[in-house]
Image: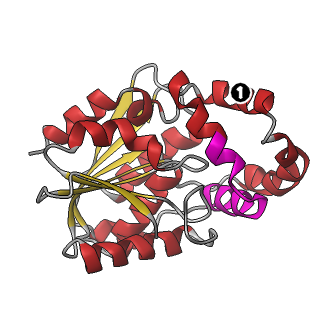
Amino acid sequence: MNYKEYGKENQKTIVLLHGGGLSWWNYREAAELLKDDYRVILPILDGHAGSDRSFTTIEDNAAEIINLIRSDLGGSVFLLGGLSLGAQVALEMLSQQGDVCEYAIIESAAVIPSKVTHAMIKPSLACSYGLIKQKWFAQLQFKSLKMKDELFDDYYRDTCAIMKEDMIAFLRANTSYTLKESVKNTTADVRIYYGSNESRIIKYSAQKIKETLPTAAVVELNGMVHGDFSINHAADYVSIIHNME
């Protein structure tokens, strides 16, 4: 698995997992703010721009990152964070190895499958995939995501680089993921974040995670949309990490 790295000389390690359709730059601003105090690893999820293999499953991605942590990072890390698809991978990692981290930030994770959306992904992309490389279409999509304007070039470049088969695969995985019962065995201090303007599935999913992990903290971010917190409010995101010390 390919990844970007910041602050390699630091002792404590943070691993942050980007959202579906994005890439490591999802957390670039946060990593820049963290690099003086932490070693920050930003894996590139399978099937995304800059990755070294096609996307298979969330479970496979989780296993790959656990292997990276075991082989290169001492078997566990200080903090594991993820957004959307990356948050699902983080939850799966907690399910597969309960002591993989001391703290976990789960942002906007869906753990309640959406059968209708799942069924529509393949036919929808069959019609729209050809538009992805059209800049006007990418600008419309980007605007709907409400990310900072300066991220458009990264978004456009990397979205164009995703193969249709990979996009279908990770979107279908994202809409069908179910929380594993084994996640309740984690020893991590888990924090769950979601925006008040997110979908009902994300909000219900936060409560589902809380039911499975009663000690987890759940925070609704007033006025925020999907991905808003870590992408557009990196300083606030980093402040939370510093306060975990």
Horizontal and vertical percent position of residue 188: 22, 60
Q: Which residue is denoted by mark 1 in the rendering? A: 139
State the residue in front, 216 or 166: 166
* Left or right of 112 in this view: 39: left
Say what secondary structure mark 1 lies in: helix
Give the extent of the magenta segment: 157-176
Where is residue 28, by image quadrant?
A: top left
Q: Is residue 173 magenta?
A: yes
Horizontal and vertical percent position of residue 104: 28, 53
With respect to residue 191, does 118 lie above or below?
A: below
- Is residue 148 in sight in this rendering? no
Where is residue 71, by image quadrant?
A: bottom left
State the residue at coordinates (79%, 31%).
137
* Left or right of 34 in this view: 89: right
Quarter of the image with the C terminus is top left
Q: What residue type is labelled 1?
A: Gln
Horizontal and vertical percent position of residue 192: 35, 44
State the residue at coordinates (27%, 71%).
98
Q: Classify 10 Å Cα crowding around label 1: few (below 14), some (14-19), many (20 and above).
A: some
Q: Is residue 216 magenta?
A: no
For the stretch drawn in magenta, the main secondary structure is helix
- Is residue 74 in sight in this rendering? yes
Where is residue 63, by image quadrant?
A: bottom left
State the residue in front, 46 or 177: 46
